[in-house]
Image (tube, grey):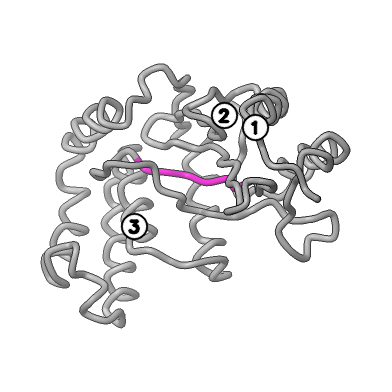
Amino acid sequence: MTLKFKKSNRERFMSDWRKCLPAMREYKSMVLMKRNGPILTGIYLQENRSNDKYIVIPHAHSLLHKSDSVSLNLYYPLKNIRNTYQDDFTIKSHGREFPDACKRLHAQTLFPLGEDLSLSQILRAYKIYIDRKISFITISMYIDPVCYLTWCGKIDEAKRMAEKNIKILSDWEDRSFIHEGGRQAFFDYLMGIPEHPEKLREIREEQIKILKIEKLPDYGLTCD
């Protein structure tokens, strides 16, 4: 019989993963995160419904468009040693497998989990994720790169990225844009991002307060 998690077990898991990811801090139970300028990155130790196993999910979230919660963009659960399926951990297996799991996490993630993060690294992660169709592709996956380029002052590149993404999204069904005010409204919004970089600064400051992440360390984003 697999033992169910108690508070002490979760605290132990978190303590171990903090040692694996010293750049990050606890955001809430079973969640570690850090900031790099306009980007949140972290891991989510997602429990199953029986509360006796968890998986490790590295993910990213943009602070440059409005949201009431942290998204799981670039969702890529830690795989097993053979890299064939997502690994899960029980109370017993965590203690036995954690050291190797820590090494695998750093090797498998699409973006670095240490202090430093660059624009080119995060853009590459989005490209790999979309090209490989790793998981469900949300519309925000086409917003974030445009925002990051604009944040870094690469306005011409941001405009070209917006135009490219509009061509891709033109094949999406109308229902994909329901929450964006409709297809044309979304396309206008996407093209407008590079025109108003100052708005991104305002949105980021608002999002920091809304998500209550003031205490998370911010290492800045390298605009290479």
- The residue nearer to you, when weighing 49 against 120, is 49
Q: Is residue 89 left or right of residue 187?
A: right
| C-alpha distance separating marks 1 and 3 | 35 Å
Give the residue at mark 3. 140
Q: Amino acid at mark 2?
A: Asp
Membership of 200 in magenta stretch: no
| C-alpha distance separating marks 1 and 2 | 34 Å
Question: Is the residue marked by circle 2 packed among few (<14), some (14-19), or many (20+) residues within 10 Å?
Answer: some
Against 68, is 146 above or below?
below
Q: Earlier in the sequence, mark 2 or mark 3?
A: 2
Q: Residue at x 48, y 29 (%)?
A: 28
- The x and y percentages for residue 115 are 58, 26
Q: Earlier in the sequence, mark 1 or mark 3?
A: 1
Residue 6 circle label: 1
Q: Is residue 71 left or right of residue 173?
A: right
Magenta span covers which residues?
57-62
- The x and y percentages for residue 211 are 32, 31
Residue 19 circle label: none
Residue 116 circle label: 2
Q: Nearer the viewer, mark 2 or mark 3?
A: 3
